Image (cartoon, rainbow, N blue to C red):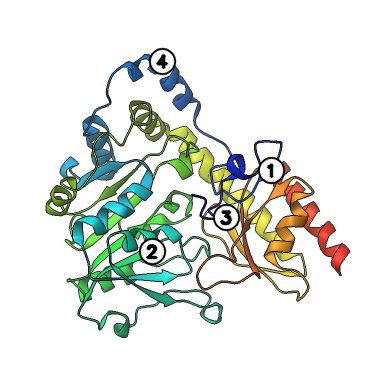
Amino acid sequence: MFKGHGGYINCVYGNNGVLDFSASINPLGYPETVKKVISKNLDSILHYPDIDCSYLRKYIATKIGHSADELIVGNGSTELFYLIPRTIRPVKGIVFQPTFSEFKEALKCSFTEVVNIMLNEDDGFRLEYRKEYFNDKELGMAVLCNPNNPTGRLIEKAVILDMARRHPDVVFVVDEAFMDFVSEPDKYSVINESGVLHNLIVVKSLTKFYGFPGLRIGYMVADADMVKRMLDYKEPWTVNTLAQFAAVAALEDKEFFYRSREFMFSERTYLFGELSGISGFLPFKPAANYIFVRIKTNDVTSVLLNERLLKSGIVIRDCSNFLGLNDKYFRVAVRTREENTLLIRALKSIFNQVS
């Protein structure tokens, strides 16, 4: 079912030359090593995949300094967001809005009461610790997105760890899907502490940074006892063989990793500067590979803007269906210089028409 996520270009518009700024995927695509390893191992689909992703789990664990029994690999990070509450069964779970809609949906599917805590623009959509958020004794889980989607706001590591230590009966689930795009990840990522703190879980997507969302693969890191419990509730055979090969090849490609980060830092600075120069916009300083923007003019909405851009063959992410936002917000992915220039040119043309 279409839920309004970015990246539905093939489903909604077909692939008819539409330039997709709605999906926040690495604009450099996937590493060449991924293409090679899939081609080389194509005949492996004649057999069932490794049901436990044993090799990949050990590889990732070694790479990030954890043990394999602290990891679960899933069919994208979304599968894991549904697995966690299905295992823990919290009575209530906090979601800080606006954010990725699947957090709320995953809790609802496990019959968990969702407590939406609304962050607002007056505070820059910044999440700061407040004791009253956690006063309810039925609260069993809190989901954080770092950097947050769609606002791009970051939460410092010290804040997350402080919350987890203050509230040991609450499981803190941290989505770090876009952390590889962050310029100083050590200030924000808590992946080293997950598995050490029993109530801290980190979920990572491999498909955003490495550019193959169609393969669906991600992983989570948690305390070994927690992982053991979750494996009892996890569906078998969810990660296909080619995705497992692709994940190892991508993670081994250090040249692609550093090239992608350097490219992203340069292009998002350019695109942020150009968006800031359009008088009708207030872009929020980006931390990942997307930029969140508020429309300041009264006579333009995100819906109208999307419709007009589509006439130029461009799609953006209308954020009006995010809880806590309205039709004055949209998000754009950072793409190549040529594509970013086309977007800016189209936006300036639209605002000239409506001014």
Q: How many marks?
A: 4
Which residue corresponds to mark 2?
Answer: 104
Which residue corresponds to mark 3?
Answer: 290
Q: Quadrant of residue 41?
A: top left
Spatial distance from mark 3 to mark 2, Cα to Cα? 22 Å
**Mark 3 or 2 closer to N-term?**
2
Find out whether the residues at labels 3 and 1 contact each other: C-beta distance under 8 Å. Answer: no
Q: Mark 4 is on which residue type?
A: Lys
Which residue corresponds to mark 4?
Answer: 40
Q: Mark 1 is on which residue type?
A: Leu
Spatial distance from mark 1 to mark 2, Cα to Cα? 29 Å
**Mark 4 or 1 closer to N-term?**
1
Q: 33 or 173: which is nearer to us?
A: 173
Q: Is residue 297 above or below residue 31?
A: below
Foreground label between 4 and 1: 1
Q: Kindly identify the residue that appears in the image at 51 percent across and 55 percent down.
A: 3
Badge number at residue 19:
1
**Mark 3 or 4 closer to N-term?**
4
Foreground label between 3 and 1: 1
Spatial distance from mark 3 to mark 1, Cα to Cα? 15 Å
* Image position, residue 179 (x, y; %): 42, 53
**Mark 3 or 1 closer to N-term?**
1
Q: Is residue 276 left or right of residue 96?
A: right
Q: Residues within 10 Å of mark 1 (few under 14, many from 20)?
A: some
* Image position, residue 265 (x, y; %): 57, 51
Q: Secondary structure at mark 2?
A: helix
**The C terminus: image quadrant:** bottom right
Q: Secondary structure at mark 3?
A: strand
